[in-house]
Image (cartoon, rainbow, N blue to C red):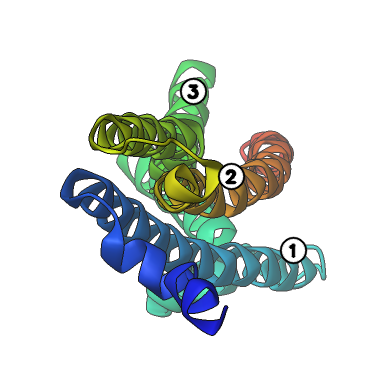
Amino acid sequence: MNAAAQDLSFIALIGNAHLIVQLIMALLLGLSIMSWTYIFRKAFAVRAARQQTEQFERSFWAGGNLHTLHQNASTTREQSGALARIFEAGMGEFIKGKQASPQRDPLDTGAVLDGARRAMRAAFQRELDALDSHLNFLASVGSVSPYIGLLGTVWGIMNAFRGLANVQQATLAAVAPGIAEALIATAIGLFAAIPAVVAYNRFTHDIDRLAIRFESFVEEFSNILQRQSR
C-alpha cells in the first residue's frame, strides 16, 4: 500500500511520465517562472509609477515656479517618474519655442503650444509603452498555457491506453498511473495560466488609470502654457 502511494506521488508521476509529457511540463514550468518574474517586476514598476505620479502632482499643484520644477525634473529625470518626464518634455519644448520666436505673434504662439503638446504626447506614448512592456507575454501565457497542458494530457492518456494493449486484463489500477501522469500537465498549465491572467487584468487596469491621469495632466498643463503665452 505504501508502494502504491509512493508510485502515485507527485514527484514519481512526473518522473515516470512519457518523455514528451515531461518536456511539456518543463516548458510550462519555464513559462510559469518567467511569468512570475515579470509579475513581480511589473508590480514594483506600477507601484513606483503611481507613487512618483502622486508626488509630482503634489509638487506641481503646490504652485511653485514652473522653470524651477522643470530644472528639477531635468536633473533627476530617471528618478522623477513618468509624469515628471512628460512635464519636462512639454516645458522644455515650450521654452525652446519661446526662445526661437520671442515676438508675441499669435501664429508663432500657436506653433509653440502645438510643439509643446506634441512633445508631451510623444513622451506620454513612450511612458505607456514602457509600462505596457511584457504585458503581452502575460496575456500569451494566460491564454496558451492551458492548451499546452491539455496537449500533454492528451498525449499522456494516449500513451496510457496504448500500454493497455499489452495487458491481458485491463483494470483501473493499470491505467490510473498513466492518466494521473497526464493530468499533471493540465494542472501545471493552469498553475501557469491563472496568475498570468489575474496579473494581466490587474496591471492593465492600473496602467489605464495612470494613462487617464497622464492625459488629464497634458490637457491641464497645455491650458496653463496657453495662459502664460498671452
Which three-letter amino acid code belongs to the residue tagged 1? Glu
Q: Amino acid at mark 3?
A: Asp
Rendered residue at 54%/83% (across/down): 2
Q: CA distance from mark 1 to mark 2?
A: 27 Å
The residue that mark 3 highlights is: 105
Ranked by sequence position, the earlier of labels 1 and 2 is 1
- Marks 3,1: beta carbons within 8 A: no
Cβ atoms under marks 2 and 3 closer than 8 Å: no
Q: Earlier in the sequence, mark 2 or mark 3?
A: 3
* Label 2: element kind: helix
3 or 185: nearer the viewer: 3
Instruction: Give residue 71's position: percent from left, percent from top.
Output: 46, 73
The residue that mark 2 highlights is 200
Query: Mark 3 or 1 closer to N-term?
Result: 1
The amino acid sitting under disc 2 is: Tyr
Label 1, on which residue?
A: 57
Instruction: Specify whether 19 is left or right of 107.
Output: left
